[in-house]
Image (spheres, rainbow, N blue to C red):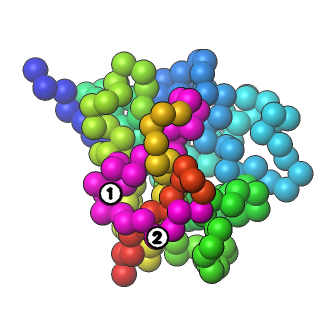
Amino acid sequence: MEELLRIVPANLASPGDLDAVFGARGVGARCRCQRYRLAVGESFGATPVEERIARQIDQTGAGDPSAPSTNGMVAYLDDEAVGWAAVAPRSEHEGLLRVFSVPWAGRDEDRSDPSVWAITCLFVRAGHRKRGISRALAAAAVRFAAERGARAVEAYPIITTAVIDEELHVGTVPTFAAAGMTQVSQPTKRRVVMRLELD
């Protein structure tokens, strides 16, 4: 029997579903998509995991179907939560705006423009990888951004897959190309900026 894949905004998922996706150990469990959201003066190592989990639940509005916004998508195979995509206005990622050079090197971009959205993370649970879930999540994230008025959506994938697991959260070039994005710059030897204009 073929499993049914469905992808929903993260506020329609429960906090327990997010816990199931990220697990109790490994890089996903430690990060909870907070690396690019740290405020001025905060460091990743000094922010306890419990705080990162609480922030993600708050940011997603998990378990609150009437939440006014959410910053991600959750993939289910049948009723099992198996994947995550972080997607939100690029300007909401404080750490990305301040610290990381990948989106900005060689580009003249208004960092505060809320109409440009970013897909900063794709994560699929062990046991469910290499089945097209990341590609489906990327495509769903692009649609989600478009439905919420984004004029463009970006991603910052890694060029090679010869990396440690921690680096793959940004996705790969073929994943985002399948969602309609094209490369607009290559700020480092290992990373590119991909973008889709929506208006």
Residue 48 spot, x, y in % from top left: 79, 30
How dense is the environment of label 1, judged by Cα within 10 Å: few (below 14), some, or many (20 and up)?
some
Residue that appears at 67% across and 43% down: 34
- Quarter the C terminus occupies: bottom left
Q: Which residue is mark 2?
A: 184
Residue that appears at 59% across and 62% down: 187
Task: Specify whether residue 4 is painted magenta.
Answer: no
Residue interval drawn in magenta: 164-187
Instruction: Give the residue at the far right of this rendering.
Output: 41
Residue 35 versus residue 104 in the image, above or below: above
How dense is the environment of label 2, judged by Cα within 10 Å: few (below 14), some, or many (20 and up)?
few
Residue 10 spot, x, y in % from top left: 46, 44
Whether tag 1 and tag 2 are in contact, CB under 8 A, the answer is no
Residue 107 versus residue 144 in the image, above or below: below
The reply, left or right, for residue 127 in relation to residue 187 is left
The reply, left or right, for residue 137 in relation to residue 6 is right
* Residue type of the residue flagged with mark 1: Ala
Q: Which mark is residue 150?
A: none
* Residue type of the residue flagged with mark 2: Val
Q: Which residue is mark 1?
A: 177
Residue 161 versus residue 99 in the image, above or below: above
* Quadrant of res 99: bottom right
Residue that appears at 78% across and 39% down: 44
> In 3D space, how far apart are the residues under numbered discs 1 and 2 (Cα atoms)?
12 Å
Circle 1 — which element?
helix
